Image (spheres, rainbow, N blue to C red):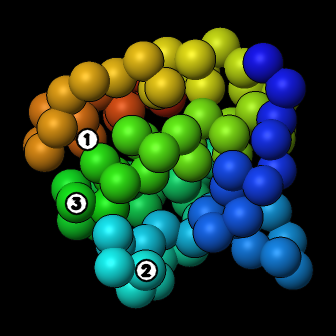
Amino acid sequence: MALDKGSVKNAISEKSTEFIFKLKNGMEIARANNLKDFVFRVKEIAAESLEYHTYNGHFGSWLRYFNRFELAEKIDSLKSNGERLREDILRIIGKI
């Protein structure tokens, strides 16, 4: 799947490739500069933000930007929510 940079316009900073965690209302709540930082943020941010980014394909698109296609596909396929979604994301990324 090709990266559609327009689909992550609101999730990737224009100045760098950092991921910008937001709530559904657009409020920025955290940023991640790399995968290690991403994991740290996933552990602490609101589940609402995880759901917003997962279901809109933002996480998958960001991972594809770094050629992490397998991780992107697995995260894009998640259907869980709340704390279960957090656990699923961490389980998938923990396998790298």
Residue 91 point in image, percent of width and height? 35, 24
SS category of the residue bearing label 3? helix
Q: Which residue is at 53% across, 54% downward?
A: 38
Reading the image, the residue beneath label 2 is 26
Q: CA distance from mark 1 to mark 3?
A: 10 Å
Horizontal side of 25 relative to 26 (left or right) equals: left
Reading the image, the residue beneath label 3 is 48
Q: CA distance from mark 2 to mark 3?
A: 12 Å
- Image position of 35 with respect to 31: above or below: above
Horizontal side of 40 relative to 49 (left or right) equals: right
Q: Give amino acid for label 3.
A: Glu
Q: Give amino acid for label 2.
A: Gly
Q: Is residue 29 something that shows in the picture?
A: no
Q: Which residue is at 17% across, 38% downward?
A: 81
Crowd rating for badge 2 (residues with CA inside 10 Å; few <14, some 14–19, many 20+): few
Horizontal side of 55 relative to 16 (left or right) equals: left
Disc with the residue nearer the chain's start (2 vs 3): 2
Q: Which residue is at 12% across, 43% downward?
A: 83
Residue 68 point in image, percent of width and height? 73, 26
Residue 8 point in image, percent of width and height? 68, 55
Crowd rating for badge 1 (residues with CA inside 10 Å; few <14, some 14–19, many 20+): many
